[in-house]
Image (cartoon, rainbow, N blue to C red):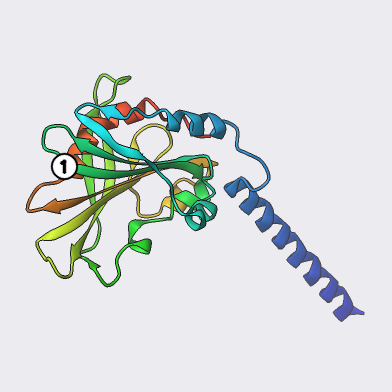
């Protein structure tokens, strides 16, 4: 009789834990309903200008592959676009997304880039980008992770990636994004890459020039 009671209690505990984990996962990913404010954030993202402070869009907006879109649950919440500096002709590739926090904050370039042609040069480093946002009188510090990949054949060429997370305000690079943003239903993720030769850093220049404008098209996350 005692063993039967213990077995029943054990089954109930497992069911409760499974239920709690399922509910938590559903809340984090927006599985059952679109988070309040997310639709507005998705719409605003699509209005990002094709000309920003000396940079202009190159060609049409691009699409992510279906597997990535489904994995990150960003069906209506991403923008993939290339920008060219009108003076230097340097080009950067921008991916900007907004979606369920549990999905978008943990995805990094190190996961999906590399292979036979490129190898990671070193561990990522945190880079501070001080800019003056249009709605703030003082400089706002934005931190980004930077990681470089070297062409195995052409050692002088490398692709630099910058990426970071935002809740609709400053951009934050953190070691533990899942725990840092766990109380927010959705968040923004930005990733910019560019082929660099020598000491030039096209992505950093793009961020310094364009972050104030990008900021105008972000909405506070819940």
Is 181 left or right of 89, judged from the image as shown? right
- The residue furthest left is 198
Q: Position of residue 20 (x, y in %)?
A: 69, 55
The N terminus - image quarter = bottom right
Q: In which image quadrant can residue 46 be found? A: top left
Tell me the residue at 11%/37% (across/down).
88
Residue positioned most to the front: 59
Q: Is residue 179 above or below residue 215?
A: below
The answer, for residue 121, to whether it is visible in the render is no
Asked which quadrant contains residue 122, the reply is bottom left
Q: Residue at x 20, y 34 (%)?
A: 208
Residue at 42% in and 28% down: 47
Q: Secondary structure at mark 1?
A: loop
**Which residue corresponds to the image point at 86% horizontal and 80% vertical from the top-left?**
3
- Rendering quarter of residue 134: top left
Q: Farthest residue toward the right?
A: 1
Q: Which residue is mark 1?
A: 90
């Amino acid at each position: 009789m005692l063993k039967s009671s213990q077995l029943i209690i054990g089954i109930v505990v497992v069911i409760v834990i499974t239920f709690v984990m399922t509910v938590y996962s559903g809340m984090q990913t927006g599985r059952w309903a679109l988070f309040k404010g997310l639709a507005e954030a998705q719409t605003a993202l699509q209005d990002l200008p094709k000309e920003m402070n000396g940079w202009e869009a190159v060609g049409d907006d691009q699409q992510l592959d279906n597997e990535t879109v489904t994995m990150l649950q960003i069906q209506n919440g991403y923008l993939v676009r290339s920008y060219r500096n009108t003076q230097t002709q340097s080009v950067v590739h921008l991916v900007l997304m907004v979606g369920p926090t549990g999905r978008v904050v943990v995805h990094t370039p190190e996961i999906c880039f590399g292979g036979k042609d490129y190898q990671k040069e070193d561990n990522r480093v945190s880079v501070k980008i001080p800019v003056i946002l249009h709605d703030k009188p003082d400089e706002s510090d934005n931190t980004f992770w930077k990681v470089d990949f070297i062409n195995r054949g052409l050692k002088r060429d490398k692709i630099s990636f910058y990426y970071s997370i935002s809740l609709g305000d400053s951009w934050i690079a953190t070691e533990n994004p899942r725990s840092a943003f766990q109380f927010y239903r959705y968040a923004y993720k930005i990733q910019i890459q560019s082929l660099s030769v020598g000491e030039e850093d096209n992505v950093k220049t793009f961020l310094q020039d364009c972050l104030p404008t990008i900021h105008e098209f972000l909405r506070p996350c819940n």
